[in-house]
Amino acid sequence: MTVRRAIVAVLLLAAVVAVAAGWPVGFWIAGAAAWAQLHPLAAGALFVAVYVLAAVLVVPGSILTLASGYLFGLPLGVALTSAGSLLGAAAAFLVGRFVAREWVEQRIAARPNFRALDAAMRHDGFVIMLLARLSPLIPYNLLNYGLSVTAARFRDYLLASWIGMLPAIVAYVYTGSFANSLTTLTSTGRAPTWAAHSLLALGFAATVALAVLITRRATRILRERLAAESQPPLSDRAK
């Protein structure tokens, strides 16, 4: 898991640098941004629809979240991504609970994290779901389907998902908007000021640092909860 996150982080950083440097990879993104500015309603609706479809099909949404920051900016990007990820999580949950329950149960049966998660849900369901959303321990798409075969209440699932996904959404969207801001600064025909670069970098660093602190703390607490649920009862260990 650590290696995979490191690879994703390197790829995301490379994408930011590529766009900021004006490499060819930014050409089609710039065209998409221009189209989104001309057709904001259509672009927003299309983005949300694609995000929902990606969630149901278990396609990672990190690239879409980054793209929302570049295409729509921070406030609107966060709103659209939050809506798309929440609707996608709801759709995947309902599919897993009412349409593909047996398939989901077979897929997660051999995963100890999900067995412990299911047990923990019986004691403090909302808190466990919130921690699971805040932590990258269980990926977004897998968690959508995994929670669908637990005793999770749909209302609590939606609220915990909305709150728990916000820190990561803000960090990813900010990364995308940071790339857009750098591109704007370097394409105005004027030399970007040191202050402009510093403010952008400071805001970016603070946002990412806060998201990392939140996710690390949530992961630690969630690991402890899951480890406790994985231990057999004292009566069984004494035998």
Image (tube, rainbow, N blue to C red):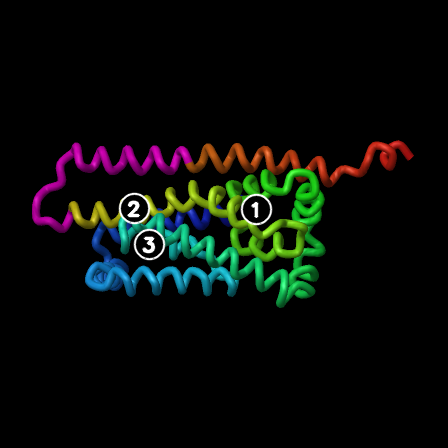
Amino acid type for the residue under numbered disc 3: Ser
Q: Nearer the viewer, residue 106 or 162?
A: 162
| In-image side of 155 versus 187 (left or right) | right
Give the residue at x 70% y 43%: 122
Q: Disc 1 on helix, strand or loop?
A: helix
Give x and y (percent) for residue 100. 63, 66
Region of the chain picked out in magenta, as a range: 186-210
Residue in front for this viewpoint, 7 or 162: 162
Query: Neighbour class for label 1 at 10 Å: few (<14), some, many (≥20)?
Result: some
Amino acid type at circle 1 is: Asp
Q: Which residue is mark 1?
A: 156
Q: Position of residue 91 (x, y in %)?
A: 52, 61
Q: Amino acid at mark 2?
A: Leu
The answer to whether any part of residue 163 appears in the image is: yes
In which quadrant of the rendered view does residue 185 lie?
top left
Q: Residue 130 or 110: which is nearer the viewer?
A: 130
Q: Main secondary structure of the magenta part?
A: helix
Q: How many marks?
A: 3
Name the residue rendered at 21%, 59% in the picture: 37
Q: Which residue is mark 3?
A: 68
1 or 3: tag closer to the N-terminus = 3
Identify the secondary structure beneath mark 2.
helix
Q: Which residue is mark 2?
A: 74
- Cα separation, mark 1 vs mark 3, equals 27 Å
Which residue lies most toward the right here?
Answer: 239
From the viewer's side, name the closer residue of 69 and 150. 150
Give the alpha-carbon distance from disc 2 to disc 3, as whole Å.
8 Å
Report whether 184 appears left or right of 176.
left
Pointer 2 and pointer 3: residues touching (CB < 8 Å)? no
Secondary structure under tag 3 reads helix
Q: Is residue 90 above or below residue 203?
A: below
Q: Residue at x 45, y 61 (%)?
A: 52
